[in-house]
Amino acid sequence: MNPRLAALVERGALAADAAVGLPPPYPAAYIDAWISLIRARTLISAVRLGVFEALPGSTQQIADRCECDPERIEVLLEALAALRYVRGRWHATRRARAHFGVDPAIALPATVGELSAAAWHVLEGLEDVMRGGRAPGLHGGVADPEVFAGYQAAMTELMSMSGPVVVRRLRRPARLLDIGGGPGTFAALACRRWPHLQATIADFPDAAALGRERIAEAGLSGRVRYVEGDARESEVGGGYDAVTLLSVLHNLDRETGVELLRAAGAAAAPRGRVVVFEIEGTRTQIGTMASVAFCAWMGARAYTAGQLAEMAAEAGLRRVRVRRPARLAGSVILIAAPG
């Protein structure tokens, strides 16, 4: 069987296995544990080495541009071809151009090259966390500054996908409180949509320091202010038309999440709304696999829509509604009124 046909057979068998449980050419556990980790590391390394920026070119040209050994970089390029990120000898495919290189539609270099690389090491401690060991944590100054900076850059990239979906739920607010919105990406998006908006971001000092730089670069320092510290204890003020917690609760245990939702409700105006966005901890691969990472890193989890609604009700929020945006399958938006 020629290599192209073998690849098609393998792909079809794996798709059938995902759909109805038919056996692929190799045992499923072999694919999940061995091949999947190599796939992930191949893409992470390609981003960190600058392979996509080095395209197009010959093996030697790419090796020179990336300062790599040509015989070894060819191994990586062949793997990227199998993953459909490169073709020929060597050009970026549409899949690669969508996320990497010059002017991608949805840029993900920090998500892959920084966040995923950091998670690679964190997940080595998963067994210890499962046995009750302490999760390393990420927020509040506990993470290595370089790792945290990469994480914040990744959050900026990911917000480019979720932010436009969430902002449409805010009903033209005049005042916004974004809890845990350190990078400032969502506040900046909201400010651009509504020129009259004044935004406050509540986050820990390390996140605020990086966020202020981005807000200044965006020319929005006069409209976005930071309050440093835990929003449950900081003087965030009140009377906000919208209070958002976007990809925040999965960092927290349930009790702390309820307390933060209570603080969000207290900061909202009587006719304001609290808006939560989360990856939902369901049977989807996105939700359940992300939940494992959250557990390993923060000792927390991705919550289901039902769990989020229960937490909101326990926090005293009213008229809790759940939305699952079609554009962000595996995610959930919770909208509630203050108590």
Image (tube, rainbow, N blue to C red):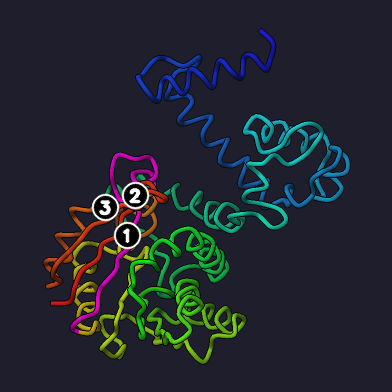
- Tell me if residue 130 comes above or below residue 83 in the rendering: below
Q: Which residue is labeled 3 in the image?
A: 132
Question: Mark number for residue 250?
Answer: 1
Q: Specify whether 45 is left or right of 182.
A: right
Boundaries of the magenta span: 270-289
Q: Residue at x 42, y 65 (%)?
A: 138
- The mark that comes first in sequence, 3 or 2, is 3
Q: What amino acid type is highlighted by mark number 2?
A: Ser
Contact, CB < 8 Å: mark 3 with mark 2? no
Q: Disc 1 and disc 2: Cα gap in Å?
A: 8 Å
Q: Which residue is labeled 2 in the image?
A: 291
- Look at the image and say whether residue 278 sits in the magenta stretch: yes
Label 2, secondary structure: give it: helix
On the image, the x and y values in percent for residue 255 come to: 18, 66
Q: What amino acid type is highlighted by mark number 1?
A: His
Label 1, secondary structure: give it: helix
Q: Disc 1 and disc 3: Cα gap in Å?
A: 18 Å
Quarter of the image where the N terminus is located? top right
Task: Report the mark closest to the observer, 1 or 3.
Answer: 1
Q: What amino acid type is highlighted by mark number 3?
A: Gly
Label 3, secondary structure: give it: loop
Q: Specify whether 120 is left or right of 169.
A: right
Question: Where, by quadrant of the figure, is residue 203 drawn?
Answer: bottom left
Q: Residue at x 51, y 67 (%)?
A: 152
* Few, some or many residues within 10 Å of mark 3 (<14, 14–19, 20+): few
* Few, some or many residues within 10 Å of mark 1 (<14, 14–19, 20+): many
Looking at the image, which is closer to me, 231 or 123? 231
- The mark that comes first in sequence, 1 or 3, is 3
Q: Residue at x 38, y 46 (%)?
A: 329
Looking at the image, which is closer to me, 241 or 17? 241
